[in-house]
Amino acid sequence: MNKNAFDKGLVRLEVDKFPTECYAKEIAELLAGGLPSLQDLIDSDVNLKKFNFWTFVLRNDDSFDVVQLGHDSDERPRFTSITDKHGRDC
């Protein structure tokens, strides 16, 4: 997590198990005030460069999504949304 993201209210939470959507939401609400939105991530300019890392976010309709913070190719830029790319039935 870079300083700019932290200054904009984003924190990195370490977890001891693979987070399902429910667990991610639960731990984020308990320790950080909730999951960020995609816009929160964009505004924070969090950037993991070429590291292929994905995180949970809440969409505008309060549904879950997973977005990429880094990018591993020109085909998937930063902040690629799984829902936008593949739909909800993937």
Image (spheres, helix red, strand yellow):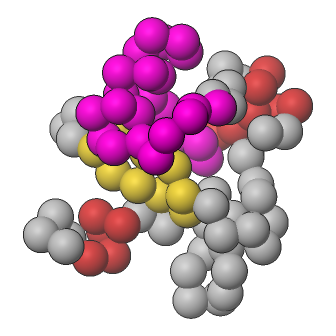
Residue 21 placed where, x, y %?
31, 41
Name the foreground residue: 18 vs 83.
18
Bounds of the magenta segment: 14-42
Name the foreground residue: 27 vs 85.
27
Residue 51 placed where, x, y %?
74, 68
Residue at coordinates 26% horizontally, 76% vertically from top-left? Answer: 86
Residue 57 placed where, x, y %?
42, 42
- Above or below residue 42? Residue 27 is above
Query: Residue 45 in magenta?
Result: no
Residue at coordinates 63% horizontally, 28% vertically from top-left? Answer: 13
Q: Is the C terminus in the top left, top right, bottom left or bottom right quadrant?
A: bottom left
Answer with left or right where residue 75 lies relative to residue 52. Answer: left
Residue 88 position by quadrant: bottom left
Residue 76 position by quadrant: bottom right
Q: Is residue 69 visible?
A: yes
Query: Residue 25 in magenta?
Result: yes
- Above or below residue 32? Residue 53 is below
Answer with left or right where residue 71 lies relative to residue 37. Answer: right
Residue at coordinates 44% horizontally, 29% vertically from top-left? Answer: 35
Q: Is residue 40 visible?
A: no
Q: Residue furthest front?
A: 16
Residue at coordinates 76% horizontally, 54% vertically from top-left? Answer: 47
